[in-house]
Amino acid sequence: MGSVLEDAATGRPLWGVDLSMLTDALTGRGLLDALHADEEERAADTDTARRAPLARILATKLLAKPWWLPVFEGLDPYSDLHKTLTSVVLAPEAVAPFPYDWRLTVAYNGALLARAARTHLTRWRERVTATPGWSAAGWRQPRMMFVAHSMGGLVVRAALEQDPELAADTRTVITVGTPFLGSVKSVLALNLVNAQAKPTWLQRSIQSLSATLPGLHDLLPGYSCLDRGLDVERLTAADVARFGGDPDLAARSLTERARYRQEGFALPGHRAIVGEAQPTVQTLDEQQQDGLAVATGRHYAFDIDDDLELVRDPATGIPARRNTYGDGTVHTPSAQIGTEAVAYVYGQHGTLMRHDEVLRQIRRITLERPQSSHLGGDGTGPGLETPHLGGTLGQPLTLTATGLDTPAGVTLSVHSATTGRPGHPLTLRRDPDRTDGSLSARFTADAPDLYRVVLDTGRHAPLTQLVLVTPPDA
């Protein structure tokens, strides 16, 4: 969701530019309604992209300012990534950003990416081979490198699977926080109305929008994630519909998930950068509330043995549960599947592309230097937890630091992400309501705004997350 979307007919920005669409009900409802996928957009597939790409809404550029949305939380811009890449290539033109309409299917956007990447590679090869003395200098024939965040990694995989020649011309694919197995948060986004979250207008608008989007349904978890007590099940289209999604979109996406499980596809030169140690929803259970199915996220996953069977407690037969952590949105197994070359960082999903360690790893891989694993990938370390539905003006927010033995030497601060207006450090204390020894602080905003929460342990790159504070419901 990190691409700016505009109305093709009027040029009006619909997403990623004016934050008032998330804080002002009068502005927001209209813009969010305009993003609903129509019948043609819901049906768009690979053939559509190759034959006649859709043009009602255009993806014009990558996100250039901090953004936010319920459940998925903060999204940082990609300007630091672009600067990092252009600093280590022969010329800035070697780097080509690829914005895409994230509302639509991964397969559709993959076809568009394959075509754009081939055009970019051809032009760049022509430029390099036209450089006097390029062969004598020992330069190699240029090849592609993809750097993809989150859903972007799924789009790259679709592009390279659809175009084997492009895959052969690809040296490396770097994925950062890509949900190869899906993310439970997609279910929670579809379930917002049932969860009765606040502010009502925003949560209802986001849920209504989400239910129409093929792209969001493509993020549905394909692993066994629905806890039934003595068993755990994969989601079905009927489950998704019960939670507020579209059964047809869900069926198509879950079928594609099953195909990948059976056939697989190896990304060439795949290097994964994975956020870890963050409190992350990994599975869910279902409860009934006023006749509605409410999905509740759980911070654990299930162990699977070598035969892909559930590991059970030998005495009770209850499935073994284990916290695998993640980046706050994508749990660790989902982001690292399909590669043994993994670098772990302490970081939140939407802010990973501004993370100093992530940018360092990308720089090293681009220059063909060894990737360092850096962390152990065992889920231990500092984590940050913020309200995933945001906050309401006048109501205190609880901000939690996990994985720390003591608050000594640790600072937690909040400042405006839109104006840069600094805030004061908060006092971290043991949270008596939690049994994991977490440290918490309370923050009350003095104005509706997008706020950046920064946790600095003094020993690692600071952890950051964005939190939107909106006016109360009218």
Image (cartoon, helix red, strand yellow):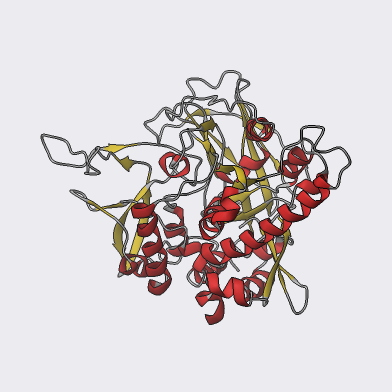
The picture quadrant where one finds residue 68 is bottom right
Query: Between residues 197 and 213, which one lies in front from this camera angle?
Result: 213
The picture quadrant where one finds residue 459 is top right
Tally of marks: 0
Is residue 266 among the parts visible in the rendering? yes
Is residue 244 among the parts visible in the rendering? no
Residue 388: give x, y in percent of width and height: 52, 50
Residue sitting farthest toward the left: 315
Q: Residue at x 21, y 42 (%)?
A: 319
Residue 444: give x, y in percent of width and height: 62, 44
Query: Between residues 348 and 54, which one lies in front from this camera angle?
Result: 54
The picture quadrant where one finds residue 258 is bottom left
Q: Is residue 176 above or below residue 459?
A: below
Residue 280: give x, y in percent of width and height: 44, 42
Q: Residue at x 78, y 73 (%)?
A: 11
Q: Is residue 433 above or below residue 226?
A: above
Tell me the quarter of the image containing the N terminus: bottom right
Q: Is residue 150 above or below residue 383?
A: below
Q: Is residue 195 above or below residue 31?
A: above
Q: Residue at x 51, y 54 (%)?
A: 71
Residue 115: give x, y in percent of width and height: 65, 62
Tell me the quarter of the image containing the C terminus: bottom right
